[in-house]
Image (cartoon, helix red, strand yellow):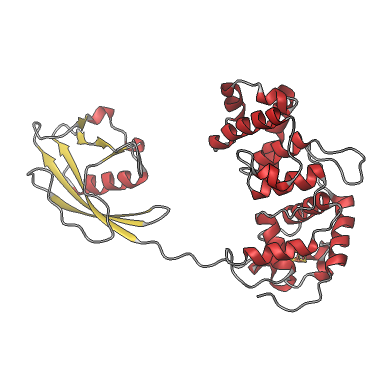
Amino acid sequence: MSSAHNLNPAETTAALREWYRGAARDLPWRVPPGSNRVPDPYHVWLSEVMLQQTTVAAVRGYFRRFLLRWPDVAALAAADDADVMGAWAGLGYYARARNLLKCAREVTAQGGFPTDEAGLRALPGIGPYTAAAVASIAFGARAVVMDGNVERVMARLFAVETPLPDAKPLLYAHADRLTPDAGAGDHAQAVMDLGATICTPKKPACGICPVHSWCAGRLQAAALPRKRPKPPKPIRVGHVFMARRADGALWLEQRPQKGLLGGMLGFPGSDWCEDPVGFAPPFAAPWQEAGEVRHSFTHFHLRLAVHAASVPMDAPGDYIAAAHFCDSALPTVMRKVFRAGHAALAPA
Ligand code: SF4
């Protein structure tokens, strides 16, 4: 639901256009508003793909280096995969770099970028946002460009109380109402610039905002967009065993490569489940209760009952000598287990 207000789409769009003419950020991939130059689709596409994962400040250098090395899409298509992956290093999400290359090769095979959203969407690694951005900015098509910035500006301008993600269709409809038939690319960039420089997430500068007069949400701007509260994280429980020999060596195992903490060192133990699990010590030893370790992962909270024992030199298991062990090599949760177990046992 959005509250009633007197936003006039034509006036709001005109005010944004006017503001953008004077305040557009100077970006290396951008053609300034009012310029006669036509934006290069390769520049627009490359910058939008890079910007999906990091900030404008970080992308500037990568963009410049890519253009120096691969000045057009055909040059990028002919590049060695390893060279492109190397040049991408530091931008993260390597699947995007692989898709970038696939896309460059497909575009080159097709003889150029498709000029409409549907054609662009069909290319590897191009989602709705990038397709709309390239179609409108590079080809002047009327396309509605939605990303987190645009959603925030629309939620505020139209005082949308519905929380995200349910509000997405409504925010899209509002963005659609404001998108002009001509100049959709500049309009999209104006909204993005407004979101990046004035209608910022935490402290929107409503006092200097060019669309202040039409904004229904300015008095509650910092609270918009609303977000659906996240469901509470489940709690998983388990048991973990720290066996220490008289020479200080510790029983540790490498966790399976796949799954949580994959390939990292850890103390052996039970599975981690939402229902309490029964447990049997891995072998007979004077196991002591060494307290509970709590740790939060992205999707759940973990509570581990720690059992610690001093074990004989011929106890079963793979041991790491004290001289080769450094607790900083353990993932955080296992470091907590080590501290709890260590505190419960008499000095080795
Ligand atoms: Fe954002 Fe404030 Fe401008 Fe509204 S008036 S669009 S809340 S900066």
| 294 relative position to 210: left or right | left
Residue 134 visible in this rendered orientation of the protein: yes
Identify which residue, 238 or 293, lies in the foreground.
238
Q: Quadrant of the N terminus?
A: bottom right
Above or below, 179 relative to 32: below
| 101 relative position to 247: left or right | right
- The image quadrant in which ligand 1 is located: bottom right
Residue 20 in picture, x, y percent from top left:
85, 53
Residue 79 in picture, x, y percent from top left:
64, 21
Above or below, 263 relative to 18: above
Numbered marks: total: 0
| 16 relative position to 286: left or right | right
Residue 28 in picture, x, y percent from top left:
79, 36
The residue sitting at 84% across, 40% down in the picture is 31
Residue 330 sits in quarter: top left
The residue sitting at 57% across, 30% down in the picture is 89
